[in-house]
Amino acid sequence: MRRCLTLVVAIALVQTTVAINQAQDQGVMGQGSSVGSIIDIFNPLGVGSKQQFRAEFTEEALDVPVPIKDQETVFKDEQDYTAMCASGVKPTVPLDTILRPISTDPPPGNFKGHAHVVKPMRIRPRDRARPLPTNKFYGNLMLGDSHAPIWTHPYGLRWDNNGLSISHIDDNMKVLGPEQMISQESRGGGYTRPGTSKYYINPFLISMGLSATEFDDQHDMTVGDFGEFGCMMVLSPASERWKGALENPKACIRVPIVRGMAFITGVYQDLTPRIFSSILVRTLTRDPNPRTDGWVKYKFLIENGITWLLYAKPDRPHVPALDLKMVNQGQIVSTSGKFTGLIQIAKLPVGREAEAESIYDSSVGVYATGGELAVRQKYFDG
């Protein structure tokens, strides 16, 4: 069973529904979506049962509380809506009455258009003709050499010559500069008080990284499937570019990037996994307790004392499990040959390792692929 929360937020006069799209059980490449405020959760690799789980809460905005009776009305309507969707009946009244564009017509001719001086890079061919997002957290993937980091929270990600680098910095590793003193005047005279820090440093340290032995420093990265909450990164060896197969590479790693994702997920296709770390791996341990669902789990204790988990499962039954070997402290490779399936990586938070590991164990195989925001006006004044 896989579970997740869909949050239904009733704020003043507007109800907002946030839905997170997740993978479903159509092989490792399957992607599911959710409508309204309920998510169908599937076992993404292999036959499994489906469970629906729902959480709702309300909060106040602008000091205007939502009356309890109106909260109940909101949630009842949402239940009716999701029940209709589950039964295959399409609601006749669309939910999005506020987020619709005012107009999609081109601007008047007296406003002249100009091409932007900064050209987006590494856009997947089929996405180039579509509107490209701006001011998104993943924008660095499309700018310059694409090697600047992005922040999904809690993880930082960066594409470089090795592959996909993963970072997570605890608070004790962040640096705040000296406080700026602020002068203020009052009726009794002037005084100074501490203000904000002059600078803030959040280092990007490569704790873990996803790659393949087929990658060299000429391997490719493309990005597409853009949405408000994320995008899809595709890493492929240079040989796919030579074949003219960047649009649909036969060998690749697909990485769904979504704000707030708990796992870094690599959907491998016909590649030999390679894991790397700049902090260096002290010990690599395979979980001795085999799982009945086909997943294998490894623990990476890196030299800063932090433990990371890696889960892996091939996309077909009766295929050998992923076997990893430490070549050196900075490089771990597969000794079981090429791999097609899921690899998921997550960090164990310091002081909560056992609790977090239990949650990861029960959630493995689920990953977000995007999100949708639906807003419906519920209350009218006058």
Image (spheres, rainbow, N blue to C red):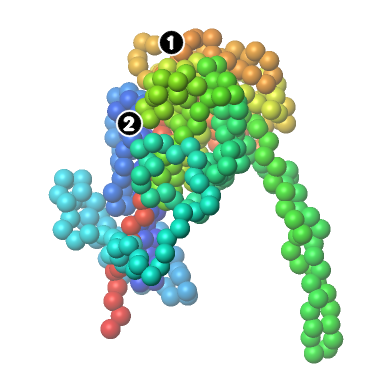
Give the residue at x 63% y 39%: 168
Could you tell me the amino acid type at mark 1? Pro
Locate residue 363 relative to residue 30 in the image: left or right: right
Say whether residue 329 is left or right of residue 343.
right
The quadrant in which the C terminus is found is bottom left
Q: Secondary structure at mark 1?
A: loop
Q: Which amino acid type corresponds to the residue marked 2 in the rendered image?
A: Gly
x, y percentage for residue 208?
A: 61, 29
The answer to which of 19 and 212 lies nearer the viewer is 212
Q: Is 331 above or below relative to 116?
A: above
Q: Which residue is mark 2?
A: 30
Bin the neighbour count of mark 1 within 10 Å (Cα to Cα): few under 14, some 14-19, many 20 and up: few
> Where does residue 304 sit, x and y in percent of width and height?
72, 31
- In the figure, 86 relative to 376: above or below? above
State the count of labels.
2
Identify which residue, 7 or 326, lies in the foreground: 326
For the residue carrying disc 2, how many other residues have a C-alpha within 10 Å: few (<14), some (14-19), or many (20+)? few
Q: Which residue is mark 1?
A: 320
Disc with the residue nearer the chain's start (1 vs 2): 2
The image quadrant of residue 157 is top right
**Is residue 20 something one can see in this rendering?**
no
Q: Nearer the viewer, mark 1 or mark 2?
A: 2
Q: Position of residue 246 (x, y in %)?
A: 41, 28
Query: What distance separates the C-alpha of mark 1 from that of mark 2?
Result: 21 Å
- SS of the residue at dot 2? loop
Res 330 → quadrant: top right
Judged left or right of residue 164, residue 21 is left
